[in-house]
Image (cartoon, rainbow, N blue to C red):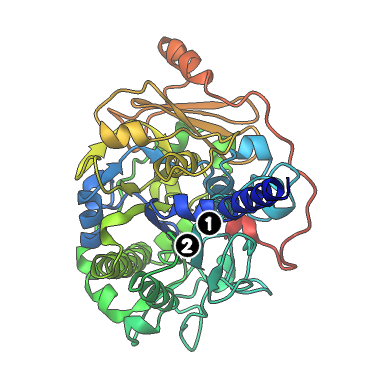
Amino acid sequence: MTIRLVLTFIYNISLLFLSAVSPHIVAADRPNVLFIAIDDLNSCLGRMDGEFPIGTPNLDALADRGVLFTNAHCAAPACNPSRASVMTGVAPAKSGVYLNSQDWRENSILIARTTLPQSFRDNGYKTLGGGKLYHASTLSENACTGLIDARPWDEYFPSKTRQLVKEVVPDQIPTNGSKQFYRGYFDWAALDIEPEEMGDAKVVDWAEQQLSKEHDAPLFLAVGLYRPHIPWYTPRKYFDMHPLEEIVLPEVVEDDLDDVPVAGLAMRKQGWHQWLTNNGKWKEAVQGYAASVSFADDMVGRLIAALDDGPNADNTIIVLWSDHGYHLGQKEHWEKFALWEQTTRVPLIVAVPGDFQVGEICRQPASLLDIYPTLNELCATDKVEGLDGVSLVSLLKDPKQKTKRSVVCTHGMNNHAVRSVDWRYIRYADGSEELYNQQTDAKNFYNLANSPEYDSVKRDLSVWLPTDNAVPEPTKTWHKKSRTQNQ
């Protein structure tokens, strides 16, 4: 009897030991993940056929080693709701997080969610994060802090309470005289500094160190780049790559706004555009954006080179995305905060080692909400229920397949854009509509919503609209001087 009890005790202890270490045993065979977030990057990549191409050799090289989703869209055209949706897998219309001023960490629906980095940590991964992964404003009292969620990270750079590195700025700002816009930070300047002095470069330097060494568990490494977010203060070398005389402005149509409903017009930053055109600075602003894109492209190149030179090159999934697109004067609008193609369309690149496509383009609609379920499947982590996106794994294996899917982008309660392969349908909270044929009118010049011949198209796209839009919850403003709707 005594021997039997001893054996039973040993057996139970063994089970306890195995249950404690088994996540790491299983995790040891799982791929690493390099998760790259870029702020305000629009469809300027060479292979995206965007209307304002900028030379992005490193981003293009990354696309060549995976699948580039050229019809990918954000879930919300604002930093906080977009990033909150990526991290939680919950669409804005379900969570009620629509604006930058809302603290998603207090939301009753999201507070109990297992976030993307937490799901990796729960499955034995080492979670390292750095730079801008959550919403933050360099204009707030809590500059560089923002809505960071420290809980799921084993380590965060520069710290778990501070996600941005202080930037180098000119001695006098604004440099272009636009003090009335973005509190002086709708600004640009060529700085006589080395790229290594930029905040993003310091984040990348930290990430390079992580990529250069072995880790005691599979790695989830998330790197957030702040540029090309404004202000476009960038080393002079990047401005020199885009001479002012070679800048080509986005195409405009004189009566473009005549068929846009009042709800759509209300989302524009028309004052910004008027100031730029009246002061002859439109080309300068586009040059500033292009310079910051080139800087960000260099940072991506450094990250990929560090991965390739390190010990994990053959077993690392790379996911690169931008939180939303960016207007550069189209429809007399700047930044994001709208529901047109230039605002919602984003770069999304997924490169997976093994039996997956390389150098392919997928033109099927995709959402940034799809990142979470895709990584969930690729890394065989415990399945998280209630994700609003879908896994893109089948498209990574066969990018040419037809999904017959549409995706939704939301800006404020009951304002939605539905994007299919061929169409963009916008319905605002007041019931007004826009409809664009993306095959013949990629720049959204001609609103077809009021033409009866397209009623059937609108009906087909309407089925994708959220039917139960969550009401925004009262929340403490995340910093006192909140003008985050415009940040």
Amino acid type, callout 1: Gly
In front of the other: 397 or 232:
397
Q: In which quarter of the view is residue 437 placed?
A: top left
Q: Which mark is residue 271?
A: 1
Depth check, front residue: 399 or 264: 399
Can you give x and y, in whole percent of width and height, for residue 107 in the image?
73, 47
The residue labelled by disc 2 is 275
Image location of residue 481, percent across then percent down: 72, 68
Residue 465 visible? The answer is yes
Q: Is residue 57 left or right of residue 205?
A: left
Count of number-bearing discs: 2
Q: From what the image shows, is residue 410 above or below residue 46? A: above
Nearest to the observer: residue 146 or residue 263: 146
The amino acid pointed to by label 2 is Trp
Residue sitting nearer the eye, 443 or 275: 443
Give the side of residue 373 with respect to residue 402, left or right: right
Q: Position of residue 213 (x, y in %)?
A: 35, 73
Q: Secondary structure at mark 1?
A: helix
Query: Which percent across, then down, holds residue 278?
Result: 42, 62
**CB-based contact (under 8 Å), mark 2 and mark 1:** yes
Instruction: Give residue 355's mark.
Output: none
